[in-house]
């Protein structure tokens, strides 16, 4: 390499550094859980460079943060994990609840018990966990009973590899709370799942491609399946089980260890804008707590009853709470389910 | 400075770095796990500094409280893992042994290329390679399409999410681990000895049993150990190819540290794996000593 081209390369290498003059923001989010266009727009408006790392579960994120992972500004915990992070003193106060624009947020989504005034976190997105099915193989199934009947009839089905979601189905079928801490109820719920394991090919998150290809007739999966339904409307469908289902909600939280707190709060304020929340929904196809944003999203999403169900269905959706030590009841039953075959 | 002292200093200089490395990165974590395995789980992960023997009680039979109950399932998962890991060793050996022979007879140029090919999979992410196996093994996958296309079967065969898929996947992942030590000992095999054995009237089978096998035994033992240990603790393959239904001890440990937030119990399970590995190494040392004598 000649000296001249070396100098040129050095200049090129330094270019991104000058673009970072406004600072950086580091997000730690679930995989594929934010529209990249939202981040691009944020950088465009503020000049702040955004980096994004991803995790696969609340517990994975908590374990990393507890183990001392630093450098992240914002995390996206589920509501019960929001409570845990607060109790462990891992969150930074942002006063987002008293910022202009917070009136856009539907108050029923300020759910975390430890954060009733949204002094820490901003409700981000929500959805339900139901069934994605192959129309040719599963017919028009409506709920968990139909789902497990497929397995009994020799078809293949998959469940999520998540102890609370899967044992939760058993609790719902028994008419119990998915936050039950009664050992007998949890055991009965696990027994329900065990008695329905025929045809359960796997406990997995990677089921949608197999439902599309017909390797699996139906799968326990998230409302985000609507993204794939919109691409393959004749092949697959998504349903909120009529017996009831679980719902989830994630909040945007700033970590106490965040190196760029100011930028993190800027991002929260940016996300209060209805057009930004709507931009995210457009790609994510999930629920937003931002009321004016719901007017801006494409009509086929707003009218989709599996994404924005009516109040009667909403009332049948249960959200997970932190169980503290009683999580161990589920842990033992989960191992029993996994080894029952 | 006298000579002996200089020697000692030299030795410290040479061994100091690796010793410090082992102390910090091997014994340190091991000690932490050992201590954790005798503590109470913290509500949100981590540990509470309260002594408890119940983590071992759950595995071995004396625990009976609201949260810690003995369940024979933990031992049966452990036995299953031992079985699957042993099967993996056998299948990788069956594939690698003839392959190592074949490659050791190649011309030097082709031989280097063949060895490069054996290590080639390391250049691609393990997860990507395992998902490629999902595409091959699933009911509408390449393998079933091929079998049905040639008329060998009329219905898709269940390959995916079975013990078979797990052993196949682990064999695939660990073949390089088995191959390289095997190749090391097979390459050193003295061809003149084989000719001598044949000249003295030994049949091919006798030559294999009395000459080839003893000469390559160190490679077989080394390869088996280095395959068995990671196979025993593997959790990615059973999770992707076993559909998390073929639960191995590695999956159970991962579950304790992540979704179940029970680090002490996970540590106790890990200690059990550690013990099994140690026993195995002692057996290997004995075998090696007998081989050397």
Image (cartoon, grey):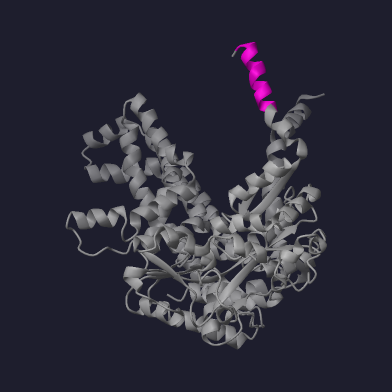
Residue furthest out toward the left: B151
As displayed, is residue B110 above or below residue A330?
above
Can you see residue B156? yes
Question: Along the line of sight, which residue is nearer the eye, A290 or A137?
Answer: A290
Position of B259 compared to B3: left or right?
A: left
What's the magenta bit mostly, secondary-structure-wise? helix
Position of A269 compared to A208: left or right?
A: right
* Residue at image location 61% in from the left, 64% down from the top: A294
Task: Please identify the quarter of the rendering in which residue B8 is found.
Answer: top right
Residue B292 lies in the magenta stretch:
no
Question: Along the line of sight, which residue is nearer the eye, B46 or A120?
Answer: A120
Q: Position of residue B131 (x, y in %)?
A: 43, 52
* Residue at image location 68% in from the left, 38% down from the top: B18
Residue A5 lies in the magenta stretch:
yes
Question: Along the line of sight, which residue is nearer the eye, B276 or B67?
Answer: B67
Quadrant of the snapshot with the N terminus of chain B:
top right
Task: Please identify the quarter of the rendering in which residue A278 is found.
Answer: bottom right
Q: Position of residue B89 (x, y in %)?
A: 41, 53
Q: Position of residue A5 (x, y in %)?
A: 62, 15
Q: Position of residue B15 (x, y in %)?
A: 69, 36
As displayed, is residue B151 above or below residue A173?
above
Task: Please identify the quarter of the rendering in which residue B264 is found.
Answer: bottom right
Question: Along the line of sight, which residue is nearer the eye, A162 or A38?
Answer: A38
Can you see residue B72? no
Label total for image: 0
As displayed, is residue B214 above or below residue A268?
above
* Residue at image location 23% in from the left, 56% down from the top: B147
The stretch in magenta equals A2-14
* Residue at image location 69% in from the left, 68% down from the top: A79
Position of A121 compared to B252: left or right?
A: right
């Amino acid at each position: 390499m000649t000296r001249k081209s070396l100098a040129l390369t050095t200049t090129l290498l330094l270019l991104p550094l000058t673009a970072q003059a406004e600072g950086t923001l580091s997000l730690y989010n679930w995989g594929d859980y934010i529209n990249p266009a939202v981040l691009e727009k944020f950088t465009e408006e503020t000049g702040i460079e955004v980096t994004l790392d991803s995790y696969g579960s609340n517990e994975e994120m908590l374990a990393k943060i507890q183990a001392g992972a630093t450098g992240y500004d914002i995390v996206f915990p589920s509501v019960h994990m929001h409570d845990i992070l607060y109790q462990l003193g891992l969150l930074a106060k942002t006063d987002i609840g008293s910022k202009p624009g917070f009136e856009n947020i539907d108050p029923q989504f300020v759910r975390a018990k430890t954060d009733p005034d949204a002094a820490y976190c901003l409700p981000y997105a929500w959805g339900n966990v139901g069934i994605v099915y192959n129309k040719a193989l599963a017919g028009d199934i409506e709920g968990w009973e139909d789902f497990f009947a497929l397995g009994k009839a020799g078809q293949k089905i998959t469940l999520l590899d998540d102890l609370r979601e899967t044992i939760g189905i058993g609790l719902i079928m028994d008419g119990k709370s998915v936050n039950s801490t009664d050992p007998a109820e949890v055991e009965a719920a696990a027994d329900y799942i065990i008695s329905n394991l025929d045809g359960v090919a796997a406990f997995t998150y990677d089921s949608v491609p197999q439902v599309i290809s017909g390797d699996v007739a139906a799968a326990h999966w998230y409302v985000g399946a609507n993204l794939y339904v919109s691409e393959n409307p004749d092949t697959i469908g998504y349903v909120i089980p009529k017996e009831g289902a679980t719902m989830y909600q994630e909040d945007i939280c700033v970590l106490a260890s965040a190196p760029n707190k100011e930028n993190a709060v800027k991002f929260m304020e940016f996300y209060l804008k209805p057009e930004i929340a709507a931009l995210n929904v457009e790609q994510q196809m999930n629920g937003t707590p931002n009321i004016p944003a719901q007017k801006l999203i494409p009509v086929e999403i707003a009218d989709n009853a599996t994404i924005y169900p009516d109040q009667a269905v909403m009332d049948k959706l249960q959200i997970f709470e932190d169980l503290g030590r009683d999580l161990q009841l589920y842990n033992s039953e989960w191992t029993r389910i996994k080894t029952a075959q | 400075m006298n000579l002996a002292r200089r020697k000692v200093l030299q030795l410290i200089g040479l061994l100091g770095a690796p010793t410090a490395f082992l102390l910090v990165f091997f014994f340190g974590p091991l000690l932490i796990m050992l201590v954790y395995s005798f503590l109470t789980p913290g509500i949100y992960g981590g540990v509470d500094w309260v002594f408890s023997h119940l983590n071992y009680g759950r595995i071995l039979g004396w625990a009976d409280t609201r949260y810690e109950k003995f369940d024979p399932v933990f031992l049966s998962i452990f036995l299953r893992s031992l079985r699957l890991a042993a099967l993996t060793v056998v299948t990788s050996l069956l594939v690698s042994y003839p392959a190592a022979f074949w490659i050791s007879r190649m011309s030097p140029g082709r031989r280097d290329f063949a060895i490069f090919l054996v290590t080639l999979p390391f250049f691609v992410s393990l997860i990507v390679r395992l998902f490629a196996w999902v595409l091959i093994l699933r009911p509408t996958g390449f393998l079933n399409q091929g079998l049905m296309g040639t008329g060998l079967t009329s219905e898709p065969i269940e390959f995916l999410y079975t013990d078979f898929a797990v052993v196949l996947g682990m064999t695939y992942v660990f073949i390089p681990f088995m191959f390289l030590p095997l190749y090391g000992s097979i390459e050193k095999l003295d061809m003149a000895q084989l000719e001598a054995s044949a000249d003295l009237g030994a049949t091919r089978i006798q030559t294999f049993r009395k000459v080839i096998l003893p000469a390559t035994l160190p490679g077989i033992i080394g390869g088996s150990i280095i395959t068995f240990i990671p196979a025993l603790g593997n959790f990615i393959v059973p999770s992707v190819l076993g559909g998390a239904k073929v639960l191995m001890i590695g999956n159970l440990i991962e579950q304790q540290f992540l979704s179940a937030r029970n680090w002490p119990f996970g540590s106790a399970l890990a200690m059990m794996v550690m013990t099994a590995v140690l026993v195995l190494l002692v057996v290997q040392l004995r075998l090696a000593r007998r081989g050397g004598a």
